[in-house]
Amino acid sequence: MSLFDDLTDNLKDLKSNIDVITKKIKENSQEIKNQTSLKLEIASEKRKLSKTYQELGSKLYENYKEGKIADYNDYVSEIDKMLSRIEGLNLKLRNQSYNREFNKEETLDNNQDIIYINEEDLNK
């Protein structure tokens, strides 16, 4: 029966390891999904910002050409909002990366605190 018990224990260990690996893969997939989503939002916001800059430049050129003095506060306000949003998204992306690295280091530190004792040590 010892061989059968060893096989059973090995299979249980294998299942446990597979469960841990599956959990890690799910966590990493979610992180990648979140980061990709943030990067897409940033790219979209940058495209909007570029379009607004072009509109402002065209408006400024036309008004200058015609000798008009115009108010560009709406453009400036809109650009400031977009720049703030981009900075906020970049900050969120950096925080996710930092949290991932922090958790990885914390896991490594926790593993270093584990002391393994076998039965022979207990019987001494």
Image (spheres, grey):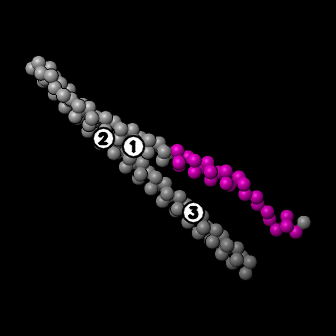
Point out the residue furthest to the left here.
66
Q: Residues within 10 Å of mark 3 (few under 14, many from 20)?
A: few
- Name the residue tied to disc 2: 45
Q: Which segment is the magenta one?
A: 98-123
Q: Residues within 10 Å of mark 2 (few under 14, many from 20)?
A: some
Instruction: Tell me the residue at 11%/18% (across/down).
Output: 67
Which badge, 2 or 1, comes first in the chain's sequence? Answer: 2
Q: Is residue 78 left or right of residue 119?
A: left
Q: Is residue 47 left or right of residue 3?
A: left
Q: Height in image: 28 above or below 9?
A: above
What's the residue type where badge 3 is placed?
Val
Checking the image for residue 20, the label placed there is: 3
Which label sits in the foreground, 3 or 1?
Answer: 1
Please provide percent x and percent y for residue 73. Answer: 23, 31
Q: Height in image: 96 above or below 15?
A: above
Do the numbered discs 2 and 1 sit on residues whose CB atoms are within 8 Å? yes
Instruction: Tell me the residue at 73%/81% (across/down).
Output: 1
Please provide percent x and percent y for residue 47. Answer: 27, 38
Which badge, 3 or 1, comes first in the chain's sequence? Answer: 3
Tell me if residue 110 is in the magenta stretch. Answer: yes
- Name the residue tied to disc 1: 89
Instruction: Tell me the residue at 67%/54% (across/down).
Output: 110
